[in-house]
Amino acid sequence: MLWVCLLCLVLAGTMARARADEAVSFAQALAATTPLIDIRLRHEEVEQTGIARNADANTLRARLGGETGTFLDTSILAEGEAMVRLDDDYRPDNAVPTYSQYPVVADPQNFAVNRLQLRNTSLPETTLTVGRQRIDLDDQRFVGNSGWRQNEVTFDAVHLVNRSVSKLTVDLTFLDKVHRVYGVDSPQGTYTGDSYLANVAYQLPIGKLTGFAYLLDFAPIAGLTGALDPRRSSTSTVGGRLAGSQPVTAVTFGYVVSYASQKPRGDNPFSFTDDYFLGELNASAAGFTLAAGDEDMHGNGTSGFATPLATLHLFDGWADKFLTTPADGIDDRYASLAWAARKIIGLEKLSVTAVHHDFEAERVSSDYGAEWDLQLSGTWHHYTGLLKYADYLAAGTTPAAIARDTTKFWAELDYIW
């Protein structure tokens, strides 16, 4: 009802100001509808020490919908999703005690409304989006759509972005539902509760300076206890980020620094104050990009720094061994080398990426192991093909409860129009 009231107020103001000779008819807005087509076929193999059988996941996902043109400064976007398991040789949900002889590949069968939103631009330099939507903030370390998984994360939210002050972007969100990658039939598929996201960015000569506050409060879900309890993700996270780049002759040098402090919120059963640090340097020239960084997520021995709304696959290795920060925290020292070119061997774009991670505990002296990640990707018209590999090797001191040796391989074909 809050969403409806807000949108009605905006529409009422628009209608009051609209002049007959400027109005675009509703029929014209419908005629300007843009189709949304996103189809992905994926093969994923997982071999994990300690699990009886290897996962062999073949899945097909289609997102189909459309977005209308504007009428009274408002457009409508509707998109449905169908995710089909082509075989049963993997475990899609760690909250359900089935297929436990396989490693987890978090791509369950799912048929749902992915997005259903109204977007209004009647207020000057302001976009208001109401409904089920995709939200990505900064590098998605704290808020993202987890687009790597077949079922992306979407939010039932009121999302306002204002750019009325030069170089300043104010991004505010109220959300009460998080539709997670596990799908509509999973006990952990939807988090509920009143949460608030504030992200304010200003463009400086040396880079983009961002301050943020993410206040999350999730309700308990019957049957989900321990590490799966949503209340453990109820947190208050406040921090900042500075990212910039500067060309020097033929080389562009860049950097990212970020800090955040996190405390419990709502019914979180733990008491803690955990910190987050990131520092990265990178350089680009002639299609090559070299980057090196250190990301620290603290823990107090009972719980670790939580990022429940992040696009987790982008961080701490593609093998996804540290989706939940260990209780003793994690120190991820990484380096990457990437090359990309356009209009080559008949492709519109071709890219190769290699990443190395060295993981250690942050609170105590303990080695978590290392990981190599490799990716080859090519784009031709509406198609993108991808081959990807991750190899995580646990250290001899790594507790089995935290992470075990794991290798993963993906072959994927996407069609987006």
Image: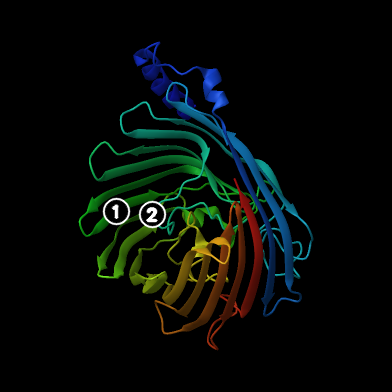
> Which of the two labelled residues, at mark 1 and mark 2, occupies the earlier sequence position?
2
Q: Can residue 45 be seen in this view?
A: yes
Q: Relative to residue 130, is residue 108 drawn left or right?
A: right
Q: Position of residue 188 (x, y in %)?
A: 62, 52
Whether 15 is drawn above or below 373: the answer is: above
How many marks do you count on the picture? 2
Badge 2 element: loop
Q: Relative to residue 115, is residue 362 drawn left or right?
A: left
Badge 1 element: strand
Q: Mark 1 points at which residue?
A: 210
Image quadrant assignment for residue 164: top left
Residue at 37 percent across and 26 percent down: it is: 122
Q: Name the residue under label 2.
A: 138
Dot 2 surroundings within 10 Å: few (below 14), some, or many (20 or more)? Answer: few
Q: Are marks 1 and 2 in contact (CB under 8 Å)?
A: yes
Mark 1: which amino acid? Thr
Q: Where is residue 165 in the image (x, y as percent from the top left)?
A: 23, 39
Residue at 41 percent across and 84 percent down: it is: 365
Q: Where is residue 84 in the image (x, y as percent from the top left)?
A: 74, 52
Q: Can residue 315 be seen in this view?
A: no
Spot the residue most to the bottom.
396
